[in-house]
């Protein structure tokens, strides 16, 4: 999967404090953007769950984060969503990130998912295809 | 209801001696306040009952009326030549009316949205059948004749104000408690390694919620497919997933 940050199209972005009480804002924005695309409602709902779960994953991996940044790239044939925790420093969690509960959930909900960690930034990128992609 | 018929109309504007005595020692003896509360509790309850049958919980109304009574005791001035019961009745009724006004304002918008939610709730299975998949927000909007934004809003409102009326009846699993626990162990085993940290929490879930998790995350069924299988609406499945994952999340945090 291409890293969306490296493409030229500007994302729709939202920054929230790294606090679970704001997760519903991420869910709401995700649903709002997804509703612009040809995405079945089942999937749209999965996306909302996945974004909340991704936030939970990042808060668990990087509890010292100051902010969470949600970026959405709505495209004709796919929706790319990245969630990034900033200001966290290196992860103190030595467990393999990809065996935990949240990761398991996200994998089931997204068509594709990656996570990366560098220079105190923890990022999850999720991708869903739209109906245009499926019919192509 | 007009406020002119609230207690004491035509009655002499003088309180009974014992009431006046209680007010006289209100500032020096804290027990006087309790005595006044007890003394006028029947008035408070009577007025609360007059507001019953409007969709509010009777206990909540009694509570609101009691607050009105307390306020009346604290603010009453015996020098003004008004009977306390008259003053208290007006204060209590004011408190009750304010409660309804505030409450109704909070409920009015969601009710419209709930109606839209009901319409959408009916439309989703129809469209799902026609299309062979769950509809997009755009398709739902076209069918119900509203905008995507309105559809989304209604669906979110339905999620927030999960009301029994939006929920189709549940099909009982007919299993005994012991069978349910055995089934839970089995489900968790199948869900795999990632679920180990929430295994205990999953076991405590109602059988139906666990079933929804299992169907979604082990069998990989869509929300619409799960809805059809367990006999509830897709929106209900969505709510179950959101709430259940939220509850499990609390446990692993």
Image (cartoon, rainbow, N blue to C red):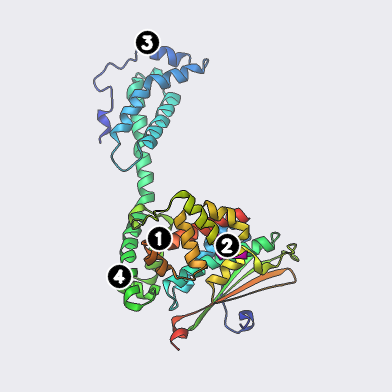
Q: Is residue B215 above or below residue B104?
A: below
Q: Which mark is residue A113?
A: none
Q: Which residue is mark 1?
A: B236
Q: Position of residue B169 (x, y in %)?
A: 34, 56
Q: Which residue is mark 4?
A: B144
Q: Which residues are magenta?
A: B188-193
Image vertical order of residue B60 relative to residue B248, above or below: above
Residue at screen point 76% across, 66% down: A90
Q: Mark on residue B189? A: 2
Q: Are the residues under badges 2 and 1 in a single subunit? A: yes
- Mark found first going from the N terminus, 4 or 1: 4
Is B192 contained in the magenta span? yes
The residue identified by callout 3 is B17
> Do the residues under discs 3 and 2 have CB atoms within 8 angstroms?
no
**Label 2 SS:** helix
Task: Compare marks 2 and 1 and give the one earlier in the sequence.
Answer: 2
Dot 3: what SS? Answer: helix
Provide the chain ID for the residue under circle 3. Answer: B
Point out the residue furthest to the bottom here: A136
Q: Nearer the viewer, residue B75 or B69?
A: B69
The vertical placement of B187 against B88, above or below, is below
Tell me if label 4 and label 2 are in contact, CB under 8 Å: no
């Amino acid at each position: 999967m291409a890293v969306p940050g490296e493409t030229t199209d500007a994302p729709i972005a939202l920054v929230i404090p790294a606090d679970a009480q704001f997760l519903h804002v991420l869910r709401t924005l995700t649903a709002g953007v997804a509703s612009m695309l040809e995405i079945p409602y089942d999937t749209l709902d999965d996306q909302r769950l996945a974004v909340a779960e991704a936030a939970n994953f990042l808060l668990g991996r990087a509890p010292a984060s100051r902010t969470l940044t949600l970026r959405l790239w709505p495209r004709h044939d796919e929706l790319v969503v990245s969630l990034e925790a900033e200001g966290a420093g290196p992860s103190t969690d030595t467990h393999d990130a990809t065996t935990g509960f949240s990761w398991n959930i996200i994998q089931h909900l997204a068509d594709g998912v990656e996570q990366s960690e560098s220079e105190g930034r923890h990022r999850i990128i999720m991708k869903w295809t739209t109906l245009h992609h499926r019919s192509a | 209801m007009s406020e002119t018929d609230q207690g004491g109309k035509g009655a002499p504007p003088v309180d009974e001696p014992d009431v006046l005595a209680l007010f006289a020692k209100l500032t020096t003896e804290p027990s006087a306040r309790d005595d006044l509360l007890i003394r006028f509790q029947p008035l408070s309850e009577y007025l609360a009952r007059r507001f019953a049958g409007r969709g509010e919980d009777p206990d909540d109304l009694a509570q609101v009326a009691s607050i009105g009574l307390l306020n009346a005791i604290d603010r009453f001035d015996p020098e003004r030549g008004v009977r306390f019961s008259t003053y208290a009745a007006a204060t209590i009724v004011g408190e009750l009316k304010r409660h309804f006004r505030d409450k109704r304002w909070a409920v009015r918008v969601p009710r419209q949205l709930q109606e839209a939610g009901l319409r959408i709730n009916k439309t989703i299975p129809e469209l799902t059948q026609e299309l062979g998949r769950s509809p997009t927000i755009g398709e739902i909007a076209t069918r119900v004749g509203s905008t995507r934004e309105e559809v989304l809003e209604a669906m979110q409102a339905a999620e927030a104000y999960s009301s029994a009326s939006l929920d189709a009846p549940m099909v009982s699993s007919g299993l005994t408690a012991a069978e349910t626990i055995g089934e839970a162990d089995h489900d968790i085993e199948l869900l795999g390694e990632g679920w180990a940290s929430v295994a205990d929490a999953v076991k405590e879930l109602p059988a139906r919620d666990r079933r929804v998790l299992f169907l979604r995350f082990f069998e990989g069924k869509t929300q619409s497919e799960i809805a059809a299988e367990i006999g509830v609406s897709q929106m209900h499945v969505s709510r179950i997933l959101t709430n259940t994952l939220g509850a499990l999340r609390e446990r692993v945090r």
